[in-house]
Amino acid sequence: HHLDLARSVRDHAEEQRALATIGRTYLFCYESDQSKNSLKLAEDAFRKSLAIVDERLGGMVSEREISEMKA
């Protein structure tokens, strides 16, 4: 929902935030279920999130915000 909306309006910063949230959610799932699938889904979401930071956000958001997104 958040991800779909961000993509529909082409808001790359919000798309990055949505993917980071999805990654954290799957990571929390992994902590409780120890499922390799949860860990893989978390990694995929985090990688997509970081790719957006590296490929689409330069010059669009402050360097401080980019650093926070990568943390």
Image (cartoon, rainbow, N blue to C red):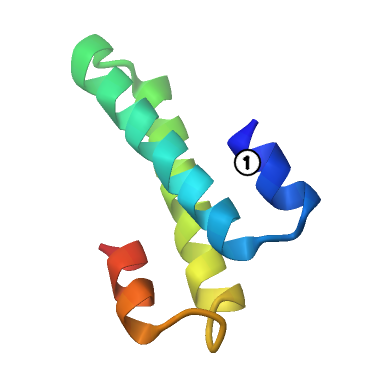
- Please give the count of numbered marks on the rendered protein: 1
Q: Which residue is pictured at 46% across the width and 54% down the height?
A: 47
Secondary structure beneath dot 1 equals helix
Residue type, numbered disc 1: Leu
Q: Quadrant of residue 67?
A: bottom left
Q: Quadrant of residue 35?
A: top left
Q: Which residue is pictured at 79% across the width and 48% down the height?
A: 8
Location of residue 14 with respect to 35 vertically, above or below: below
Location of residue 31 with respect to 62 vertically, above or below: above
**x and y, in percent, of residue 66 in the image:** 38, 75
Can you name the residue that lies furthest to the bottom here?
A: 59
**x and y, in percent, of residue 21 in the image:** 41, 40
Q: Dividing the image into 4 quarters, which one contains the N terminus?
A: top right
Q: Would you name the residue on which mark 1 appears?
A: 3
**x and y, in percent, of residue 15 in the image:** 59, 53
Q: Which residue is pictured at 46% across the width and 32% down the height?
A: 41
Q: Residues within 10 Å of mark 1 (few under 14, many from 20)?
A: some
Q: In this view, does 44 lie to the left or right of 28?
A: right
Q: In this view, does 5 lie to the left or right of 64?
A: right
Location of residue 66 with respect to 51 vertically, above or below: below
**x and y, in percent, of residue 68 in the image:** 29, 67
